Amino acid sequence: LLAKAVMCKQFSDAHTSNLSQQIAANYLNSGRMEAGLQHARRVYAGRAAALCQGLQRELGAAVDFSPPQGGLFVWARLTGAGGRSTDAAAFARRAVEQLVAFVPGAPFYGQAPDAATFRLSFATASEEKIAEGCARLRAAL
């Protein structure tokens, strides 16, 4: 079964449609890509900064994180400051009650998962929504 699935996958990847290739070539030759990239970088940098500022403002010493150097996520770790829990999965359940969702970090570890870690995305939320989400996270602590 695996060999047949591999053959089907290879066959389906054999060629991208000529129309799709022409559309991509036209866009790349139009000179608009750089402006689009600059816009995306500004938007995502603003969102990343809003998330980092919001986490610092709302969660303070209860969370430790480094500003992202790329990507669309902030990895954070519950510190246990003030006697708070360091269980990110429990924090995630409480956050959902506050209408905020994030991913606990433990499933991303190959070995020895850190149950205090979690991953927050800033990809799709506006800076205003990010600030509101951080305030809701404070309520979930």
Image (cartoon, rainbow, N blue to C red):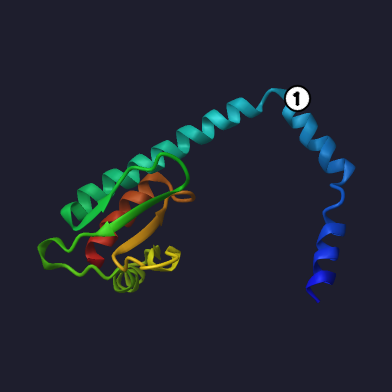
Relative height, residue 56 to residue 35 (above, below): below
Residue 73 percent coordinates (x, y): 42, 50
Relative height, residue 94 to residue 119 (above, below): below
Please name whichever residue, 52 or 124, is drawn nearer the observer in this view of the structure.
52
Q: Decide if residue 39 is on the left or right side of residue 69.
A: right
**Residue at horizontal 35%, vertical 61%?**
118
Badge 1 density bin: few <14, some 14–19, many ≥20, Cα 10 Å: few
**Residue at horizontal 16%, vertical 67%?**
84
Q: Decide if residue 40 is on the left or right side of residue 93.
A: right
Please name whichever residue, 13 or 39, is drawn nearer the observer in this view of the structure.
13
The answer to which quarter of the image holds residue 127 is top left
Q: Decide if residue 49 is on the left or right side of residue 15.
A: left
Q: Kindly identify which residue carries mark 1.
A: 29
Q: Decide if residue 17 is on the left or right side of residue 27.
A: right
Q: Residue furthest left?
A: 82
Amino acid identity at mark 1: Asn
**Residue at horizontal 36%, vertical 53%?**
75
Q: Residue furthest top?
A: 31
Residue 70 percent coordinates (x, y): 45, 40
